[in-house]
Amino acid sequence: MKEVTFTISEKSFVLEGEVISAKMDKTVVVKVTRILKHPVLGKTIKRFKKYKAHDEQGSAKCGDWVEIVGCRPLSKTKHMVLSRVLRTSR
């Protein structure tokens, strides 16, 4: 099997979020939530985005909080790598 290496530079962006799906082989779906203020009303709003991240060892399970890092495109929709598991689910 071909060895896959990832170079993480200082320009790579780091995000953290919750794993919402770990059903694919070597891929997890991470939900990253951000909080912002409405420009007119000033009300706090939650927005989220789902990222597919590469998980070589399969260490992340559904419900875990993880840190993901941007890398080169690995497939059509996957351009992040799982950096570490911050907190495991109960």
Image (tube, rainbow, N blue to C red):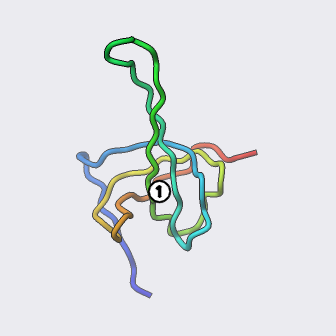
Identified at 39% across, 80% down, the residue is 3
Farthest-out residue, right: 90
| Number of residue marks | 1
On-image quarter of the C terminus: top right
Q: Quadrant of the N terminus?
A: bottom left
Which of the 4 quarters of the picture holds residue 35? top left
Outermost residue, left direction? 11
Q: Amino acid at mark 1?
A: Leu
Q: Can you tell which quarter of the image residue 76 is in?
A: bottom left
Q: Residue drawn at (58%, 51%), measured in percent from left and top? A: 19
Along the line of sight, the residue nearer the viewer: 14 or 78: 78
Is 25 located above or below residue 38 in the figure?
Answer: below
Judging by the rendered image, the residue that carries numbered circle 1 is 82
Q: Position of residue 2 (x, y in %)?
A: 39, 85
Query: Horizontally, is 33 left or right of 64 in the view?
Result: left
In percent of the image, x 32 and y 17: which residue is there? 39
**Place of residue 40 in the rendered image (x, y in percent of width and height, measured from the top left):** 33, 13
Is 38 left or right of 33, judged from the image as shown? left
Classify 41 as above or below 57: above
Q: Mark 1: few, some, or many residues within 10 Å (few <14, many ≥20)?
A: many
Location of residue 73 in the rendering, given as x and y in whole percent from the top left corner:
30, 66
- Give the image quarter of residue 36: top left
The residue sitting at the front extreme is: 40
Percent across and percent down for residue 44 are 46, 18
Q: Say which residue appears at 26% left-offset and 52% top-offset.
A: 9
| Element carrying mark 1 | strand
Q: Residue furthest top?
A: 41
In the image, residue 44 above or below residue 49: above
Front residue of this view, candidates 81 and 50: 50
Q: Is residue 84 above or below residue 57?
A: above
